[in-house]
Image (tube, helix red, strand yellow):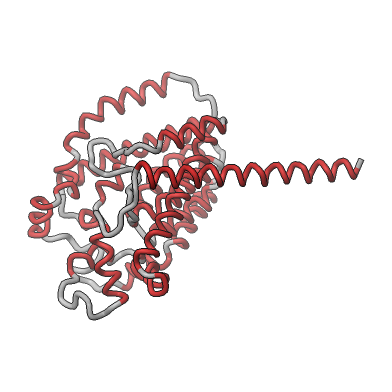
């Protein structure tokens, strides 16, 4: 009997390893197909204009001695530059960005597969969801791609944030918020948006007594621990125009309004006001249907939190477009 039990455990372990290898091969094949035949890969394009000059200056101090103001403001409260400068010294910028893009893309597909399988309970449906991710997809009413064909700060942290959502679906709020804190080191706005959206799930679990109040405190502490370096940078940043909470000047807003209006919610989100009716219908439909599982309720709680965040971003962006968040391109992050 013991021999049979041991053999059964070995067969089970071998089966899990085989399924894991098969899944990894499928994701790799999908990733290569996506890059080669669908989206492609680009370097020194789009938002990388904000990252590459400062990263080049980090590697070679003689570059851009008097022209760092533009891209410094976009990276001032992010550790993207120092983190990527280390491998770039040995691999070069192009190889560093390509390898990071491949890892981030694989992580993106991996977490999306986990979420789809968790929500549907069907592995075949999860694979079908991955196929639906292949076409070019933009965030509604914006020009922001859900997944860019080049490496961005948001692309680096998106797999971490989605993995945090997966942990929340499994009632693991503390590691989820720790991941949000780590993500804040690279792109604070995306991490903050995910953390705020998932607060609805946290509130639901607390209300339904799936978790105890101490978990909320632990989750907050875990996020602060993950973002410890960022907090230290905020606390030690100089007071004045370069401080994080200093208001952006009206002259800067006028330049952005003319050259990049999509950064300001008041100008790029006017069409999203029409989403209010659709969101209300969606909310009524959800309230009318029975909740079959905790996962259903948690997802709806996150969606409702996103609706509240969207409304807040619209109101704030319409009334006070010169808040510090504007220079960190809050619109795409809140839309996502």
Q: Nearer the viewer, residue 300 or 59?
A: 59
Residue occupying the far right of the picture: 1
Q: Nearer the viewer, residue 43 or 121?
A: 43
- Name the residue at 20% across, 33% down: 273
Q: Would residue 220 be found to the left or right of residue 50 on screen?
A: right
- Name the residue at 50% across, 35% down: 116
Asked which quadrant contains residue 307, the reply is: top left
Q: Which quarter of the rendered picture does the N terminus lie within?
A: top right
- How far from the left and from the top, in percent, is residue 106? 47, 49
The reply to whether residue 20 is visible in this rendering is yes
Q: Would residue 198 be found to the left or right of residue 137 on screen?
A: right
Q: Nearer the viewer, residue 224 or 164?
A: 164
- How far from the left and from the top, in percent, is residue 64? 19, 74
The reply to whether residue 188 is visible in this rendering is no
Asked which quadrant contains residue 89, the reply is: bottom left
- How far from the left and from the top, in percent, is residue 47? 25, 56
Residue occupying the far top of the picture: 288
- How far from the left and from the top, in percent, is residue 240? 19, 70
Q: Would residue 18 be found to the left or right of residue 176 on screen?
A: right
- Name the residue at 36% across, 26% down: 283
Q: Which quarter of the rendered picture does the C terminus lie within?
A: top left
Residue occupying the far front of the picture: 37
| Total residue callouts | 0
């Amino acid at each position: 009997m013991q021999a049979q039990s041991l053999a059964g455990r070995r067969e089970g372990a071998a089966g899990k390893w085989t399924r894991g290898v098969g899944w990894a091969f499928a994701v790799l094949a999908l990733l290569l197909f996506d890059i080669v035949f669908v989206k492609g890969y680009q370097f020194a394009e789009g938002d990388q204009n904000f990252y590459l000059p400062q990263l080049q200056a980090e590697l070679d101090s003689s570059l851009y001695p008097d022209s760092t103001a533009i891209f410094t403001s976009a990276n001032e409260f992010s550790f993207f530059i120092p983190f990527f400068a280390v491998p770039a010294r040995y691999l070069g910028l192009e190889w560093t960005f390509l390898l990071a893009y491949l890892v981030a893309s694989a992580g993106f597909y991996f977490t999306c597969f986990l979420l789809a399988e968790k929500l549907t309970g069907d592995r075949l449906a999860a694979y079908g969801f991955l196929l639906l991710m292949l076409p070019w997809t933009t965030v509604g009413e914006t020009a922001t791609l859900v997944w860019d064909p080049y490496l961005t700060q948001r692309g680096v942290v998106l797999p971490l944030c989605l993995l945090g959502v997966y942990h929340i679906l499994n009632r693991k709020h503390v590691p989820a918020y720790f991941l949000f804190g780590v993500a804040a080191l690279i792109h604070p706005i995306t991490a903050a948006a995910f953390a705020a959206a998932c607060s609805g799930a946290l509130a639901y679990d607390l209300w339904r007594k799936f978790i105890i109040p101490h978990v909320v405190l632990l989750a907050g502490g875990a996020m602060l621990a993950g973002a410890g370096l960022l907090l230290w940078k905020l606390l030690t940043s100089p007071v004045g125009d370069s401080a994080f909470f200093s208001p952006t000047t009206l002259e800067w807003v006028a330049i952005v309004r003319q050259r990049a209006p999509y950064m300001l919610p008041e100008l790029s989100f006017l069409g999203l006001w029409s989403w209010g009716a659709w969101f209300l219908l969606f909310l009524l439909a959800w309230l009318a249907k029975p909740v079959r599982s905790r996962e259903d309720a948690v997802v709806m709680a996150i969606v409702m939190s996103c609706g509240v965040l969207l409304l807040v971003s619209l109101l704030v962006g319409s009334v006070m477009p010169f808040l510090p968040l504007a220079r960190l391109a809050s619109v795409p992050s809140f839309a996502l």
